[in-house]
Image: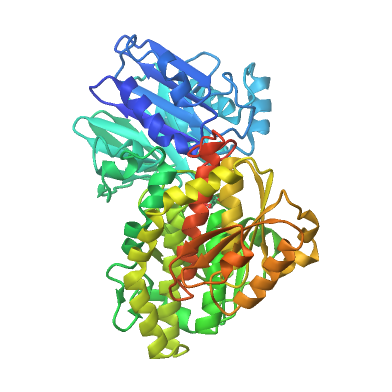
Amino acid sequence: MCGIVGYIGKRNSLPILVDGLKRLEYRGYDSAGVAVINSATEVKLFKKAGKVKEIETQIPVNEFEGNVGIGHTRWATHGEPNDNNAHPHTCMNEKFYLVHNGIIENYKTIKKKLASEGYVFHTDTDTEILVNLIAFNYKKHKNNFEVAVRLSLCEVDGTYGIACLCIEDPGKIIVARKGSPLMFGVGQDEIIVSSDASAIIAHTKNVIYLEDGEYAVLRRNGIKLKTIDDEDIHREVQEIEYDLDMIEKSGYDHFMLKEICEQPDIVQNTYRGRIKFETGEVKLGGLTNIKEKILNAKRFIITACGTAWHAGLVGEYMLEQYCRIPTEVEYASEFRYRNPIIRQDDVVILVSQSGETADTLAAMREAKKHGATTLGLVNVVGSTIAREVDAGTYIHAGPEIGVASTKAFTCQLMSLILLTMMIAKEKGTIDDEELKKIGAEIELLPYKMKQLIDKKDYFKYIAEEFKDAKNFLYLGRGLNFPVALEGALKLKEISYIHAEGYPAAEMKHGPIALIDENMPVVFIATKDGTYDKVISNIEEVRARKGKIITIATEDDDNIADYSDYVLRVPKTHEILQPIVNSIPLQFLSYYIATARGCNVDQPRNLAKSVTVE
Ligand code: M6R
């Protein structure tokens, strides 16, 4: 939700900032902007509504040179996405320039106070209030940039990741964080600030993560790290784990396509070194310190948002089926606001790709407040949820740039499978033969997933047939009900076609009224205990002339009789089938969206990580 970038060093900052903005654009793309200071302390401010690509040629990269600068890509919260509300924002006397990710909740109170001091405002943003507050405190505290920023931050409620420039103190960038991620790369005589590693990795792998309640004064060759309460901090430099090619498209048309296609390799990263295929025994080192709590848990509560919530629903089926532990799945956004009953012997599992989703973070803190044990299944290393949970296991999907989550979903499923296997073995709720079968199938899984990637042209052909549909229904039962939900979410978020996911048997309680010859219905009908029932549901749709697309296993000789189109998938153990079944659905939505000319990597109104409530 908004991307922040900054540069201070010897090089011309503008090209570095623009490159950083492009890499961070998945976080928000309503507008973009930069502010750069040159050696004569002149400032160039450029900001505009639109995506970086659309406005790039207007950014004065070749006309202005400055070694210090900040930039921002916006996902609008306060004020519509227009040029005026774009960041960076400046204060009334134009001494300060600020980029901000987050929400200043008490901005109205501060605005009133500043207005009474004669300050006037020109935008609808909370950020403009903060930059003016900095200017106000600067004047009040003997023109001290650092003190002005620190004391201003002490006055604000809400969340922020900020980077601030002062034209009277141009050799510094001051950055601070509370609730919105911020880090900086430490290069040779230069520092690159960013919301995440993607804007840094091309320059250095050495980074320092800022924690909540901290700020840093960055000079070309010096860093001062402090808390907002003015205490000194020392923090070691860490090394980023991935390489530049992991955040490039590498010849694919879109990040989403790349991320779908790399799943056979990526899913191996989730289980590599954690499982013995021959026995199905699993070791999750990150959970050692809470293992007893997990094994003695009276209940699991899985809480997450969006795609991660769908993964959680699959997790519920698996944990109850194989571990016999009652499991509930909660939307993180609802969890904390409904005064939930959380007990000390509950284990609350937080599933999140970004590890920064505000609702999931709040749910985690709520769980901790009640003394429950928290367990994170997170992708982004060093993210807030990853750092704050009692213990966790990274899903190792690598950077996911496409806004629509694909590989993170399958890796979340794989993490939940590993967790289930580990608990079931320890509790003796699964027999060794069954565990062995799962282990053997996990070893084969990448090959089976690869077979589906090789069939992408067929999925494209089906997508062409349905690109003009106005609505879609996705139906599945058991483990495949969440797969149906995820298929529908993928389609609606990138193609803007209305789509609903339902348990197949629920269709007759309402959605069946929607069915006519114009309604495509995707059935996830791979062979499992509910197969015959699903076939009956297919019959019900056929009787009403709905168009039937089935996801079916290769050994299913009958399914073609019931379907207009069959998308064949390899058969695997039922616990792994949701991973396999998701791939054709991802392709279907990708190719429908591209056939409709949609920007799949940057769908309208969405942002990759939702760091506001
Ligand atoms: O980073 P998280 O996994 O916590 O994000 C949760 C949702 O915002 C995310 O899954 C969202 O629904 C995606 N756009 C789905 O493709």
The image's colouring method is rainbow
Residue 132, compared with residue 595, is above or below; it is above
Residue 471 horizontal side relative to residue 426, left or right: right
Q: Quadrant of residue 444?
A: bottom left
Residue 481 horizontal side relative to residue 274, left or right: right
**Disc count in the image?**
0
Residue 520 placement (x, y as % from top left): 66, 52
Residue 491, compared with residue 124, is above or below; it is below
Residue 59 placement (x, y as % from top left): 41, 16
Residue 497 horizontal side relative to residue 57, left or right: right
Q: Is residue 209 at least partly visible in the picture?
A: yes
Q: Is residue 144 at least partly visible in the picture?
A: no
Residue 352 placement (x, y as % from top left): 49, 57
Q: Quadrant of residue 289?
A: bottom left
Residue 387 placement (x, y as % from top left): 41, 58
Residue farthest along the front direction in this orientation = 561
Q: Residue at x 54, y 65 (%)?
A: 312
Q: Residue at x 54, y 33 (%)?
A: 597
Residue 565, compared with residue 195, is above or below; it is below
Q: Residue at x 42, y 45 (%)?
A: 257
Residue 106, compared with residue 354, is above or below; it is above
Is 58 in front, or is 191? 58
